[in-house]
Image: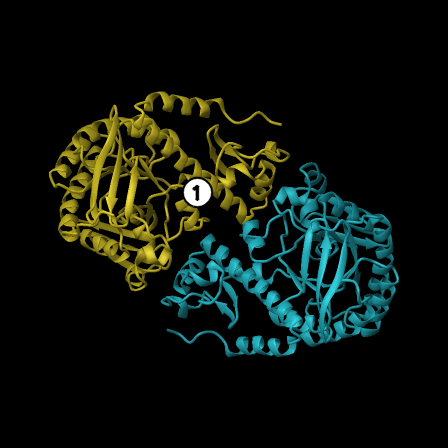
Chain colours: A cyan, B yellow
């Protein structure tokens, strides 16, 4: 096991990279999908299951954890890895995005952001330095700078102001993080849907010499084509020898297309959230188990999967569980969905190694387009 | 594996019996606790976990399953064992108790009961014959007669009328069930809190020569002493060579005291329901994980347990999950609770074999009375 945080590219296929992030807690095979473990749990899953699906790293949400159970408490209890029984790498966001989307009475200035908890109204201050301190208390292996993310569509001058503020905060986060050889602090490229601003952000961040770079402020309502354009403007400006993480993305199709543009890491609530809403991701596309056509269908979601949730339970049973709002329905569909996502990442990694990403991506997309099994 | 349903007593200790129910689908070590799998799922649990805890049989609720997904549908899908992926013995109730407690616009007469679904208002008829038909469609190994259960306290004349009606329905259920060597139909002793009526019911049912006998209409609000008095009036009137099932009971203490009075089988929603409400059953009594005293407690629920949920997760983490209403909290506490119940049954069986039930029951009760660990 390596003692310092590092990244190497093992193979490329066009702009796509097959790589490996290494750190004392383990290795991350990239392109990687990070299941979201918001409040110290990947919802409805046992950590053993998450790991067995091939997850090398999970994401924790700083905003949620700082409010409940509290960062200092998690530190006293031995850190987030020990607390949540996930001894492998953890990435935490900065908390900023969810302060903006969930907290009440937000006030943002150069110094940072003040807000009130959406749970109990308690007042908090979050500066770039405090965000890094909290992520350190949690024990996060990959920490994110505090940034300001503007909803799209937005005014160019607002986007630019937020991007420039985020750059200044990146410097402060870098200083606060200091020298921690086994961990990393990633900067976040902002700039909304303006290529000029994205390029400026990526170039300036690169000059800071960080250990990794995230692309933030995308998948916030804009069309996929805009997101891909922004990746095309951003990735060439980022150093080739550092990992690139596209925050909060996305659908399986988003992932295929972003990998082809040079992204190495992803996180998204879609597979877990969809699992709690009766939706299954499969190689035949998205399947809505609430639909009455499954009520008498003895077939599993995917008879060829090696995930028990996908292979061993009938659609009729899953339909019944979803309709009855049984916890097991959410448990099985989340399991299926994370299995599907991790299988997709495995296929993507193998395709890059074989130099066949475009061909295999086309086959995968054809599978989705053909759609689900015909009714029994 | 036996081809016919049978029961034998392997050891006794006072009135307590260590026995074995056998049938084509497997053996049930008695005294046995049956986890409740209301709608084809033991809530928040994978069936593999339920089995691994030492559950030989689970219970399915006819009322819930007939409404959703429907008995005929379950039959078409291969029966409840296949549908829910539990290939071991299943006992179903008759549906009558939940018609009375959940359904709308109930009307009961000699013929049976008509009601409307609490889910969608659809009209149903349930006769003794239809209840047995439904249980057969589900594929139930141990089926229960339709009975009428009176809430306590109640008027003696109402209790007597319902008990006599239940006796007549027992005969009709026996005729409807017919000759099914590998399965059983149990009669249900009624009679409320009146020893005279309990004796009459038990004696008359015994004359029907059924394969097993349940005691119903208890744990419906009466004091524990009344329930135990009724067991003392009932059990001696039941044939010694047939299993005795106390329906819907109960707390660990209820189980200890009922075993000592000759009961062989139990079912109860307590361990599963409590697990969804932040409550843990332990050898130190019931622990409420919502309580703030657990917030910083790094200790597990029970470091000596062999159940991962009890042994490997800190109280602080469980407290956090419960407070955050995370599904994993209910998953882990239900797992802990069923593990505790099944461990209790294992200890009871071993105690009867050793002729030490009274002594070991006293030790178990002392553990509960000492209470939980002192705060950290």
In-front residue for pair B165/A97:
A97
Q: Which residue lies most toward the left here?
A: B207
Residue B75: image location, x then y, percent: 28, 61
In-front residue for pair A94/B343:
B343
The residue positioned 24% from the left and 34% from the top of the image is B192
Residue A254: image location, x then y, percent: 65, 71
Please tell me how many numbered marks the rendered image carries. 1
In the image, residue A107 sits, relative to residue A316, either above or below, namely: above
In this rendering, position of residue B182 left or right of residue B283: left
In this rendering, position of residue A311 left or right of residue B65: right
Image quadrant containing the C terminus of chain B: top right
Mark 1 Cα shell of 10 Å, populated few (<14), some (14-19), many (≥20): some
Residue B215: image location, x then y, percent: 24, 37
Which chain letter matches label 1? B
- Determine which residue is flagged by label 1: B273
In-front residue for pair A204/A191:
A204
**Element at badge 1?**
helix
In this rendering, position of residue A280 left or right of residue B21: right
Residue A48: image location, x then y, percent: 55, 50
Q: Is residue A217 visible?
A: no
The quarter holding residue B219 reads: top left
Q: Is residue A63 visible?
A: yes
In the image, residue A296 sits, relative to residue B59, either above or below, namely: below
In the image, residue B179 sits, relative to residue A365, either above or below, namely: above
The quarter holding residue A246 reads: bottom right
């Amino acid at each position: 096991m390596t003692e310092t945080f590092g990244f190497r590219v093992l193979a490329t296929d066009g702009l796509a990279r097959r790589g490996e992030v290494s750190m004392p807690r383990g290795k991350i095979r990239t392109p990687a999908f990070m299941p979201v473990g918001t409040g110290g749990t990947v919802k409805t899953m046992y950590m053993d299951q998450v790991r067995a699906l091939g997850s090398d790293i999970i994401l924790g949400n700083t905003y949620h954890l700082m409010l409940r159970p509290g960062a200092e408490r998690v530190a006293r209890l031995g850190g987030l890895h020990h607390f949540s029984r996930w001894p492998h790498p953890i990435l935490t966001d900065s908390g900023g995005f969810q302060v903006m989307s969930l907290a009440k009475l937000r006030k943002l200035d150069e110094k940072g952001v003040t807000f009130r908890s959406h749970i109990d109204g308690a007042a908090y201050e979050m500066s770039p330095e405090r965000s890094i301190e909290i992520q350190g208390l949690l024990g996060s292996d990959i920490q994110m700078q505090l940034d300001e993310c503007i909803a799209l569509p937005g005014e160019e001058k607002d986007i630019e102001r937020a991007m420039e503020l985020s750059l200044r905060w990146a410097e402060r986060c870098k200083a606060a993080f200091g020298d921690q050889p086994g961990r990393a602090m990633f900067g976040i490229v902002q700039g909304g849907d303006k290529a000029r601003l994205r390029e400026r952000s990526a170039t300036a961040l690169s000059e800071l010499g960080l250990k990794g770079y995230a692309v933030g402020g995308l998948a916030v309502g804009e069309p996929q084509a805009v997101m891909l354009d922004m990746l095309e403007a951003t990735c060439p400006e980022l150093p080739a020898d550092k990992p690139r993480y596209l925050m909060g993305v996305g659908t399986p199709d988003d992932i295929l297309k972003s990998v082809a543009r040079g992204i190495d890491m992803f996180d998204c609530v879609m597979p877990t959230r969809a699992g709690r809403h009766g939706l299954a991701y499969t190689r035949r596309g998205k399947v809505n188990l609430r639909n009455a056509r499954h009520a008498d269908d003895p077939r599993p979601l995917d008879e060829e999967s090696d995930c028990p949730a996908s292979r061993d339970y009938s659609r009729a049973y899953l339909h019944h569980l979803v309709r009855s709002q049984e916890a097991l329905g959410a448990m099985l569909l989340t399991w299926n969905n994370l299995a599907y996502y991790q299988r997709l990442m495995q296929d993507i990694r193998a395709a890059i190694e074989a130099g066949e990403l475009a061909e295999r991506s086309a086959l995968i997309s054809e599978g989705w387009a053909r759609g689900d099994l015909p009714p029994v």
